[in-house]
């Protein structure tokens, strides 16, 4: 379809950028969005250098703001875009005791991580091409409740439950849905330092953005519901299923109690 595009939200981050590059190499037209226009423009130039034959649309979008999201939907509708792919990579990874959250932080993380993904998906389904691929970045943290990461893990878990349910609703409608649940991915300087501080666990869990994207796209092609890149991360997820949660919570709390992270 001539006017079919893959939409990437959170395109300028480490994982989002790798998805854009992989899709550009495949020759897919792209709509890219992020929080800063200058980063969007730089990414657009990089993608066109990879494949000058693709079409690229772009727009700065504040995902927590429903007005900004609607402006994005109106823009895509006016361009006559049909959506063949949705790659939702955006997320706020604040980690600290919940009692230290402000109302603003609660709303920001909840709206970006979950509400915006649901809203965008609703729009995409109304503008879908004959076939549609949906790839949503959840997290290994969304597979078990995590003290001191409680809101983040809850929003990522909500993505898993929502898209699993949606996949059941859309069965037989030529829609593939995969939830990507990576462990540690070194994308920003603060994340790199955080991985280092976790010692051997951080090193074993760590997978590069390009590796994560490669595995995710293979899983999406096969329409796998959950994608967990890396043997160690798969093994850790298996352990959470057989370990009493009281023990899990104690281990997680000890690990993260004094490792606050508030990048936004």
Image: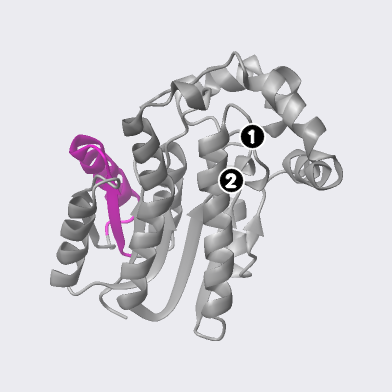
Q: Label 1 neighbourhood size at 10 Å, few (<14), some (14-19), many (20+)?
A: many
Residue 90 seen in render: no
Q: In this figure, which residue is indicated by the disc labeled 2?
A: 212
Marks 2 and 1, how far apart in space? 22 Å
- Residue 106 lies in quadrant: top left
* Location of mark 1 (residue): 146
Q: Nearer the viewer, residue 51 or 254?
A: 254
Q: Is residue 217 left or right of residue 239?
A: left
Side (left or right) of 185 relative to 203 = left
Residue visible at 71% across and 17% down in the picture: 199
Question: Is residue 173 visible to the viewer in this orientation of the structure?
Answer: yes
Give the SS element for disc 2: helix
- Give how far across and how far down residue 35 sits, in percent: 26, 39
Q: Who's the residue at 55% across and 44% down the image?
A: 154
Q: Residue at x 62, y 40 (%)?
A: 141
Residue 99 is inside the magenta segment: no
Q: Which residues are magenta?
A: 29-52
């Amino acid at each position: 379809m001539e006017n079919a595009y893959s939409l990437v939200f959170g395109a300028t981050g480490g994982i989002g950028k790798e998805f854009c590059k992989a899709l550009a190499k495949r020759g897919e037209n792209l709509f890219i969005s992020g929080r800063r226009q200058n980063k969007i423009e730089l990414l657009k130039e990089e993608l066109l250098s990879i494949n000058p034959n693709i079409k690229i649309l772009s727009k700065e979008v504040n995902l927590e703001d429903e007005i900004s999201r609607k402006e994005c939907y109106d823009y895509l509708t006016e361009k006559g875009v049909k959506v063949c792919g949705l790659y939702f990579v955006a997320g706020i990874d604040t980690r600290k005791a919940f009692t230290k959250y402000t109302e603003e932080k609660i709303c920001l993380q909840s709206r970006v991580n979950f509400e915006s993904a649901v809203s965008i998906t609703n729009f995409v389904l109304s503008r879908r091409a004959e076939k549609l691929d949906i790839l949503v970045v959840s997290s290994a943290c969304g597979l078990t409740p995590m003290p001191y990461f409680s809101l983040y893990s809850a929003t990522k878990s909500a993505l898993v439950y929502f898209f699993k349910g949606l996949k059941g609703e859309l069965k037989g409608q030529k829609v593939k849905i995969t939830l990507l649940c990576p462990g540690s991915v070194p994308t920003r300087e603060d994340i790199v330092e955080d991985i280092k501080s976790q010692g051997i666990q951080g090193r074993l869990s760590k997978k590069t953005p390009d590796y994560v994207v490669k595995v995710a796209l293979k899983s999406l092609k096969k329409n796998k519901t959950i994608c967990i890149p890396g043997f160690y991360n798969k093994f850790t997820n298996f352990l959470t299923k057989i370990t009493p949660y009281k023990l899990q919570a104690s281990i997680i709390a000890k690990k993260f109690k004094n490792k606050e992270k508030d990048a936004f």
